[in-house]
Image (cartoon, rainbow, N blue to C red):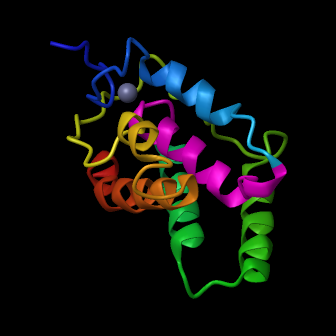
Amino acid sequence: MPAQCAWCGAAQIDGMDCRTLHEYLTGYDFTPANAVPHAIHFLQVTCFMVQHERYSDEALGWAQTMLRAHLDAGMSAHDLRMYVTSRLQGSDSSTRTWRFNRAPDARPLPKIAWEITIADVAQRMGREATYAEVVTRWAHATLRQMPALLA
Ligand SMILES: [Zn+2]
């Protein structure tokens, strides 16, 4: 039995846990030819944080709004940039009154059987789809399941 992640339930890949995979994907040295757009990077980090219970309740609400905005196909790149900028002003650490990081004594979050985990992303990228496509699918699945965290 491969070791399972205590947070998202993913099985380790070749001894690599989710945190290792996350660091690998975040720091992955993509060549300019297939550079990862900022939006894809954002989705990857946000999905990891959501599935690993790193966010406070307020940050989960923020993440849900941001995922929805990123995945809304009707939103142009320009609109998205405007939207993100306006939202980020409210999430600036100097002006916001809530914390991103989940406090150790915060209410326990319900366990969710995530349809797609970071381990799935790492295994599928470059095989059945590009990295951007796999991450986008991950974000859709995460967004669909995350209301259970906020209930
Ligand atoms: Zn995990």
Q: Is residue 129 visible?
A: yes
Give the residue displayed 50% in from the left and 68% down from the top: 68
Give the residue displayed 56% in from the left and 46% down from the top: 44
Where is residue 135? Give x, y as percent.
50, 53
Where is residue 150? Give x, y as percent.
34, 50
Give the quadrant of ligand 1.
top left
Give the residue displayed 22% in from the left and 34% down from the top: 111
In the depicted structure, whether residue 1 falls above or below residue 31? above
Left or right placement of residue 29 versus residue 118 in this view: right
**Prevailing SS of the magenta stretch:** helix
Q: Is 19 in front, or is 15?
A: 15
Give the residue displayed 61% in from the left and 25% down from the top: 23
Outermost residue, left side = 1
Based on the picture, tell me whether residue 90 belongs to the magenta stretch.
Answer: no
Outermost residue, bottom side = 74
Looking at the rendering, the stretch of residues picked out in magenta corresponds to 32-56
Based on the picture, tell me whether residue 50 belongs to the magenta stretch.
Answer: yes
